[in-house]
Amino acid sequence: MTYIKFTSENTLDHVSLHDCVIYAISFKNQSLSVLFEHIDVLSTHPRNNTGKAMYTGKAILKFIDFEILESFLYDTSEIEGKKRIIVEGEVQKRVIDISELLIDFEVLKNEEVQTQDNYCIHRFDGSTSLKYNADFGYWIIKYKTLIIEWDELIDTAWFEDR
């Protein structure tokens, strides 16, 4: 992104990432940058004065002083001919490198797991890229600071009354 118009710190609880897709990641020093096609900025966000949740253009979540605690894929590649799969019993849970898991990862749910010693721990669940059969995956990250950046508020979010 060449121009960042909006920046906020530690405001993930004022953003919705449901159905948001990660298109790239990068590592620099002690930070992980996760680049999204868009995010939804809630009406409660201090940088949103529209009164409605708004979707953005491209956005970056920068996790500063971070550690990846877990990065898993629920692999269904060995299962054939089933329309309904029971994850706990039939799927192989595979550890997967975060740089592989996150490309084309669609966030379906994210939640704060806990805070401890000035660190926050978040879990992100979602569907993986077609490379991994669009299977379900999740990652858990521990970080000290989260910087959220985006270029513009484009229009009302899909879940708002239009």
Image (spheres, rainbow, N blue to C red):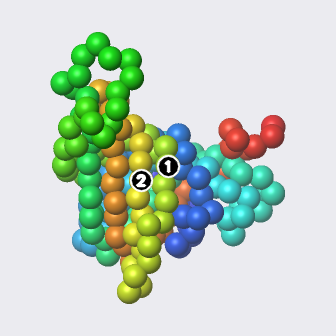
Residue 38 visible in the displayed image: no
Query: Could you tell me which residue is drawn at 64 percent across and 46 percent down?
Result: 55
Residue 89, given in percent of the width and then of the height, sits at 27, 36
Element carrying mark 1: strand
Residue occupying the far bottom of the picture? 117
Residue 31, given in percent of the width and then of the height, sits at 31, 68
Q: Which residue is mark 2?
A: 124
Whether 74 is drawn above or below 77: the answer is below
Query: Could you tell me which residue is drawn at 57 percent across and 68 percent down?
Result: 11
The answer to which image quadrant residue 13 occupies is bottom right
The answer to which image quadrant residue 86 occupies is top left
Residue occupying the far top of the picture? 81
Element carrying mark 2: strand
10 Å crowding of disc 2: few (<14), some (14-19), many (20+): many
10 Å crowding of disc 1: few (<14), some (14-19), many (20+): some
Q: Amino acid at mark 1?
A: Lys
Q: Which residue is mark 1?
A: 109
91 on left or right of 38: left
Q: Amino acid at mark 2?
A: Phe
Looking at the rendering, in which quadrant would you find the C terminus?
A: top right
Whether 101 is drawn above or below 27: the answer is above
